[in-house]
Image: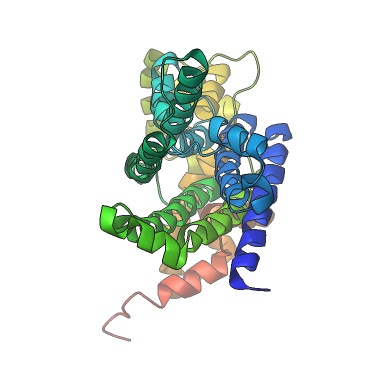
Amino acid sequence: MTFAEFFHILILLGFFQGSIMSILFFFSKKRSRPNRFLGTLILLMAMACLNLYLFESPWFTNNPILNLLGNIIPLVIIMPIGPLLYFYIKSTIDPTFRITRKQGLHFLPVIIDCGPKLTTVIYITGLLSGFLKPAPDSWGRFIDNYNVYADIPRWGSITVYLWLSARYLAKLEPGKSPHIRWMRQFIRFFLVFQTIWFVFLVPYVIPSLTDRVVNAIDWYPVYIPLVVLIYCLGIKGYLMVPEELPVARKGITPPSLKLVEEAEPLLKKAMEQDLLYLNPELNLALLSRHTGLPQKTISLVLNQHLQKSFNEFVNEYRIKAFKENIRQLQQDNLTILAMAFDAGFNSQATFQRAFRSNTGMSPREYITRHLEKQPKPENE
């Protein structure tokens, strides 16, 4: 088997993999909105693989009817990928995210992808109606040139939305959630692909080098990484499905900005100044009495605005207190469990589970790693 044949099969497998993953995402009941964004994004990449496979297959290009359909039906639709990846990230982090009519305008540049197909339809319609004279060479040359230079706004669009996504993620607390860590990994995957595409694109868009580049290396440098990207995004994205962020329950309206502005400072004051988290018996009712806020209001603000459960909200402060005082483990000869109880936890199992969820490691691993980095006192 030659490399060209292997490449051909790899591209076809990329199409099938992308199609299967898209179906799984569309029919998944978990995190349905983010999954639809990611499923559509992967499907568009899979369709681009199918387009290349078909137009490098003699059975397709040598059949006039199939070749005509291939030149009319748009399979390479790249411009929506940028908005889709941005909205996927936003909807994953913010379960209340919705696409408004204004945000729908982000998808208008898809007209750039339809340019060659529209040109083909205009030409065929003009021939059949008698308005145009047969000139396949000039129209074909225009379509070929269009396809070359259309890759510039395509690459630019994805790059801009990657930058917007990175800026959005930069505002979030690092390591706060496995979904945030996955989103940053998601961005890195795309940045690697964009870099590879850019290296190919620079000589490709130079008129004197376009044919040489394609004849010498074909589309291997772009489409092999594209297939790898389909596998990485599909498999990793699907594995993230069961670990949901808190989402809005049906029938519950997100809190108003005024309510958030009133409740959030009171909740933070109760934790940061009044240190309520140190009370092992703290529950929603006690917090409600202390702040004067109804329990439903507290739950609504925590779940819908801060994207945390009550326990997650309180335990974050307890874990922070534990981290700040780990030096006392050596100085006062305290045990890890004693420090956990001093931070407000009332059970070892709860502490272990909350700490691993927050940091990705056990308390002992965290202590070993961080105490080694701290300078020893001079008298030691």
Residue located 72% across and 44% down the image:
20
**Whether residue 159 is visible:** no
Compared with 192, 89 (above or below) is: above
Answer above or below: position of 230 versus 257.
Answer: below
Residue 143 visible in the displayed image: yes
Q: Which colour scheme is used?
A: rainbow
Which of the 4 quarters of the picture holds residue 242?
top right
In the drawing, does residue 261 fall left or right of residue 364?
Answer: left
Above or below, 308 against 330 in this view is above
Instruction: Compare residues 253 and 375 and report the one nearer the observer.
Output: 253
Residue 43 lies left or right of residue 291; in this view the side is right
Query: In the picture, which quadrant includes the N terminus?
Result: bottom right
The residue nearer to you, when weighing 306 against 37, is 37
Where residue 257 appears, as percent x and y from the top left, is: 38, 16
Is residue 85 shown left or right of residue 237? left
**Quadrant in the picture for the C terminus:** bottom left
Q: Residue furthest bottom?
A: 380
- The residue located at (57%, 34%) in the rendering is 34
Residue 292 locus on image (x, y percent)? 46, 18
Q: How many labels does the image show?
A: 0
Q: In which quarter of the image is residue 51?
A: top right
Q: Which of 284 and 45 is in front in this view?
A: 45
Image coords of residue 153 (percent x, y): 33, 39
Q: Quadrant of residue 265?
A: top left
Residue 8, image x, y percentages: 63, 60
Q: At x 52% / y 56%, what residue is drawn?
A: 223
